[in-house]
Amino acid sequence: MFENIEHIKENYLDLEKKMIDPEVLADISKLTKITREYNSLKPIVEKYDQIKDSESTIEENKDLINEADDQDMVDMLKEEIKENEKLLEEYKEEMKILLIPKDPNDSRDVIVEIRPGAGGDEAGLFAGDLYRMYHMYADKEGYKTEDVEVTSQGVGGIKEATFMIRGEGAYSRFKYESGVHRVQRVPETESGGRIHTSTATVAVLPEVDEVDVELDPNDIRTDVFRSSGNGGQSVNTTDSAVRLTHIPTGIVVSMQDEKSQIKNKEKAMKILLARIYELEEEKRNKEIADNRKSQVGTGDRSERIRTYNFPQGRITDHRINKTIYQLDDFLNGNIGEMIDSLIAEDQTRKLEKIGEEE
């Protein structure tokens, strides 16, 4: 498994040189790509150096034992060998995890879209619960959130919510939330006490730059129109709302959250880029379907991933068959245990896949 690490280290050192090359420093898109690749290789190279240091210490101590005539010295060297052999075993296990093929998007910020599914007003209320849950979790973990556009429904809850989560490794944790979330509970308006089932769909998209998506400006149609709803003096008086249409794919993004047409266009472009990138990723993933089978879930927003059962006070994730009986706590943003379990299971399946191929 570790045969190619010398090559990885050579590539890492080459990237290090490129990062201080004046030609690269003058090209921000090239520098961004190189820095991203360099940072992805850094933990592997550092772990490899630890492995080599331990191996070197073990070999040196074995040579010293052959030359030593002091029993105390021999005992000390043997103890040091024992300690390094234990460390070496730990380092190699950690290296196996590091060598699992990385999702290139893991380090990116994310765009989260939540929409009510089946269940009418109750679905909108549940979508609002998920919106609040993710904001609370992000806050606990030190991530920054920014609402892009949130549309409320009359009885509470939301019709649609789009927001950004920024911070190191945001996508690596939030990506497991993509899919259909199902809630089972008795609505407040239900006089007969019957349990209703409603759903909400969550899409987690990596935030991308224009350098990550091949985009022809001529393929984008821009329409401006007057905003509707709350928004101060600019509403219904200026054409501040923006609609972007990507003609080849038919993807449409509208934005009227800001009073400024320029800011609305910037936000809409971020969402458009993310959706086009997601579409391209889906095409690539279909080509490597066998590898996707080894992952936890498909990342497909139509996959039913989790049930929130209020009468039983439980949350069950169907991808890993894990149930937690702390529903209120979970909805208050304490979802880390579930995400950690999903990551662990994902890594286990990928390691098994690597083992089968060796």
Image (cartoon, grey):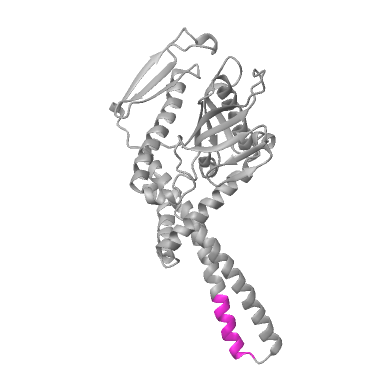
Q: In this view, does 128 lie above or below 279?
A: above
Question: Where in the figure is residue 172, as x and y percent of width and height?
Answer: 52, 45
Which one is in front, 122 or 92?
Answer: 122
Q: Position of residue 177 (x, y in %)?
A: 53, 38
Is 213 situated left or right of 16 in this image?
Answer: left
Instruction: Where is residue 329? Give x, y as percent.
Output: 69, 37
Is residue 286 left or right of 111 when viewed as pictured? left
Q: Which of 304 and 220 is in front in this view?
A: 304
What's the magenta region?
Answer: 56-68
In the image, residue 250 sits, relative to residue 10, either above or below, namely: above
Q: Which residue is drawn at 48% across and 52% down?
A: 39
Q: Quadrant of the N terminus?
A: bottom left
- Above or below 46: residue 316: above
- Using the rendered image of the protein, determine whether residue 99 is visible from the camera's viewpoint: no
Residue beneath the point at 68% across and 84% down = 75
- The verdict on residue 66 being magenta is yes
Q: Position of residue 250 (x, y in %)?
A: 33, 26
Residue 31 on the magenta span: no
Residue at the far right in the pictured view: 72
Of the pair 189 and 218, the residue shown nearer to us: 189
Q: Which residue is drawn at 64% across and 24% down?
A: 194
Q: Answer whether residue 201 is visible to the viewer in this image.
A: yes
217 or 330, nearer to the observer: 330
* Furthest residue toward top: 237
